[in-house]
Image (spheres, helix red, strand yellow):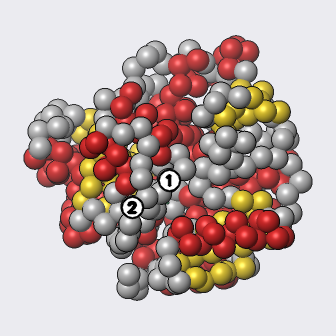
Amino acid sequence: MIAYLECTGTGERYPADALMGLSPAGKPLFPRYDLDALAETFRPDTIDLSRADLWRYAPVLPVVDPSDRVSLGEGWTPLLPAPRLSRELGVGLCWIKDEAQNPTASFKARGMAVAIARARELGVKAVALPSAGNAGGAAAAYGAAAGLEVHVAVPSDTPPPILEEIRMLGAELHLLQGLISDCGAFVRDGVERHGWFDLSTMKEPYRVEGKKTLGYELFEQLGGRLPETIVYPTGGGTGLIGMWKAFEEMERLGWIGAERPRMIAVQAEGCAPIVEAWRTGADSAGFFENAATRAVGLRVPSAVGDFLILRALRESGGGAVALPDAAMEHGVRLLGKNTGVFASLEGGATVAAVLALREAGELGPEEEVVLFNTGSGLKYVGAEV
Ligand SMILES: *Cc1c(COP(=O)(O)O)cnc(C)c1O
């Protein structure tokens, strides 16, 4: 149960059950829990093993009443050892966290399951969001499961399988010319006019809570420890920010010490605001003009949580890499033939990033690396961006 909401900019606190978007300071809000009290009852040996989904971590999730949960089987995806891929890449051991096995075939399911359940618990009837595609599909699915009205605004060049998914799940699909930032403007207008609850990335407090379960899962699936390095394809950065939050919580709960994995953000050369900010040592990122990449999940020219991403990269001793689409495609092929996982371009990007970092000498030959395949390659078939 949440103790309070906290502004990630000012540290100001707000009531646990307030329905809020960004804080008054315009920064993301983090749900905070009474972790010192929870440490007594929520331990690795008391995790609810009967749930093969992310609700096994319910004590650190914001949904209060178990009957308010919305579930389609999200989370608890396999962490697959990939020894042949590891040899190909020249690292000690690669694990693939296969998030394509979530409902709607991408890891957006995690955030949406929790955010939509919590929004409904707080009385919301209609939600809306701009999406590069997968967030829209997941919102449509969980909105349908929860019985909420869902509005999704996507760029008109979104991959056809995702458009079909959103339509078939009963959401209102708004196809717009332009980028996700233009879709954002459309949603803000609808929020003002119709009172929709805005589910935009990092603009409400709960999607990050669903995504943070990635961090708890890695710990559990590795037998009670964290990996050396995590490579994450970064758009809005919810999963990276969420995992970083999970590690902080796990330390407060007494599950781990001060050790942290190195966090590496991967972006597309055609849209790399975080990588540019990382290179210049900035605390926040500028707007990336003329964003273009076929990895639609990475086509995010400006991220509200940029400072949180950059902080995690810095505090973890990690880094940020930008790659051309062709390298991501090569990564998809390498991953496919060496593991049997048909990844999205974003998943392929993590493989390409390991190759690039090995060549640059920034990853050692004994390194243990977790690669995130954030979505299925099947969702992009027929895309012509
Ligand atoms: C949304 C998305 C990403 C980026 O995730 P963020 O948490 O926004 O950084 C990566 N891959 C896929 C397939 C996505 O749908």
Nearer the observer, 91 or 47: 91
Question: Do the residues under discs 1 and 2 have CB atoms within 8 angstroms?
Answer: no
Q: What residue type is labelled 1?
A: Ala
Q: Where is residue 5 in the image (x, y as percent from the top left)?
A: 73, 34
Left or right relative to 363: residue 149:
right
Nearer-N-terminus badge (1/2): 2
State the count of labels: 2
Q: Which amino acid does label 2 sit on?
A: Phe
- What residue sits 15% from the left and 34% below the top? 364
The quadrant of the image that shows the C terminus is bottom left
What residue is disc 1 on?
303
Q: Is mark 2 on a helix, strand or loop?
A: loop
**Mark 1 neighbour density, 10 Å: few (under 14) some (14–19) many (20 or more):** many
**Mark 2 neighbour density, 10 Å: few (under 14) some (14–19) many (20 or more):** some
Relative to 144, residue 264 above or below: above
Q: What element carries label 1?
A: loop
Q: Position of residue 340 (x, y in %)?
A: 31, 62
The numbered dot on residue 288 is 2
Nearer the observer, 178 or 141: 178
Q: Where is residue 204 in the image (x, y as percent from the top left)?
A: 69, 49
Q: Position of residue 373 (x, y in %)?
A: 39, 56
Q: Mark 1: is the Cβ under 8 angstroms from ligand 1? A: yes
One can see residue 374 in this view: no
